[in-house]
Image: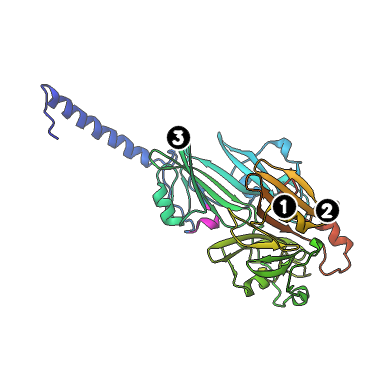
Amino acid sequence: MRIEKKRGEGGLIRRGIVLCLMLLVVLSGCQKDDNTPNRKPEVSLSENLWDFEFSMGEDVWKLPLELSKWEEKGWSFEEKQEDTMLEAETYIEGEILKNKGQEIQVDFVNPEGEKKPLKECYVGGIFLNYKSEGPCYQLPAGIILGESTIVEATDKFGTPTDEYEEKEDIYITYEYGKYKEAELVFHAEDEVLYQVRLKNYREPETEEEISDEIPQAVKEYRTPEEYHGDFMEYVVQYDNCFYQIPAPVSAFVENGWKISEEGSDKYVKAGRHGYVTLEKNGQSLYAVVKNYDEETTDIQNTFVTNLSGDFDVTKVSIGVGEEIVLGISAEEMKARLGETSYEAKEEEKGTDYFLYSDESKKNFTRIFVDKELQLVREIEVSNSPEELYGAEENEDEKTNSSDALLNEEKITEE
């Protein structure tokens, strides 16, 4: 395209050039100022998003991290919260930390096995929102808020677990097992990253002496060979293999499942819960596990306490009771339940049928029936007893026992 120069335009162009040069000089001077907002400092971060490292300005952080470490850098929260107690293995979302006029939204988590004051807990989640006048936020692999595009992010971090577009934003999520995920939000128009939510509520790894011995409970485990009509036995057929829940992680490994390193704990302390991500044929199983031994043990020697299968998310075949499987009609499901008592709960898209072990409702089998199709669409089995195989319960262990990491407001596994 040809642009014709009008009368007097040459002078304007020359003056424009001079002004641009002056502006570049001014900007060059600003870039040398370490306090300039959004200046890109040189920081060293992991290449892996699942390490949950990030930087704010020149400060590098990792989740989870003790609240005391944030306080050392000048961050603080409301004094009235200092005496707040956080139950064992629970979390609180959406709290505010402040530092010299800056504010960030964080989640506090207590991943340990006993109740603790909030000030002794960890920052396990954070929400970063790009602002032109704010600090430079960087993620692993050189991804920067306000600069990096969705193409660059997915090139570095791989195919996301989930991706969808809503209004003027594009959301992508990376899940690395239970309570371990990253959500990245991009403007739909230019596909530039502007918001990030990181969440890692897992207990930080420390130097632990891990027993090399296979726990006796694992040695005593016996694989069932067929369905069991008594739901209280928690026999389940999963991916065409039978298990009795809780079942050793090693039993799943023997049946072709592989432990995902980035989504699994390396070890679990005695009597505590942990998390494992198992993968097979392109499917991922996010499971809560428990160590029934008296010593810290490798994740493979812990017991899976919950399983689920459905048509939408965890697309793995599953069956319980008198061969109640995905896809059978609601009428046939009720026939196979026989005289087994259950509690029905109406949901928007269907009905949940809960079969509880006892009045505590902690351990259960859940069967979901689709409202429109009137067929079984999802089955979940959750059983985390204090002791295995009828062993006598130790009172101290009962007192200190804890469920898997859960939101304070609702003590149920999701």
Could you classify mark 3 by the number of other residues whose Cα lies within 10 Å: few (under 14), some (14-19), or many (20 or more)? Answer: few
Q: Badges 2 and 3: C-beta atoms under 8 Å apart?
A: no
> Which is more foreground, mark 2 or mark 3?
2
Camera sees residue 253: yes
Q: Earlier in the sequence, mark 2 or mark 3?
A: 3
Where in the figure is residue 409, as x and y percent of width and height?
74, 43
Location of mark 2 (residue): 341
Could you classify mark 2 by the number of other residues whose Cα lies within 10 Å: few (under 14), some (14-19), or many (20 or more)? Answer: few
Quick one: SS at disc 1?
helix
Left or right? Give the position of 49 relative to 349: left
Q: Earlier in the sequence, mark 3 or mark 1?
A: 3
In which image quadrant can residue 357 be found? bottom right
Question: Taking 196 as reference, is 366 above or below it?
Answer: below
Please name whichever residue, 345 or 357, is drawn nearer the observer in this view of the structure.
345
Q: Earlier in the sequence, mark 2 or mark 1?
A: 1
Where in the figure is residue 117, as x and y percent of width and height?
75, 46
Left or right? Give the position of 362 relative to 136: right
Q: Residue at x 73, y 41 (%)?
A: 82
Where in the figure is residue 189, as x and y percent of width and height?
39, 38
Question: Taking 77 as reference, is 65 above or below it?
Answer: below
In which image quadrant can residue 188 be found? top left
- The mark total stands at 3
Quick one: SS at disc 3?
loop
- Between the C-alphas of marks 2 and 1, the distance is 16 Å
- Between the C-alphas of marks 3 and 1, the distance is 61 Å
> Which is more foreground, mark 3 or mark 1?
1
Location of mark 1 (residue): 331
Which numbered dot is residue 133? 3
Could you classify mark 1 by the number of other residues whose Cα lies within 10 Å: few (under 14), some (14-19), or many (20 or more)? Answer: few
What range of the chain is rendered magenta? 48-53
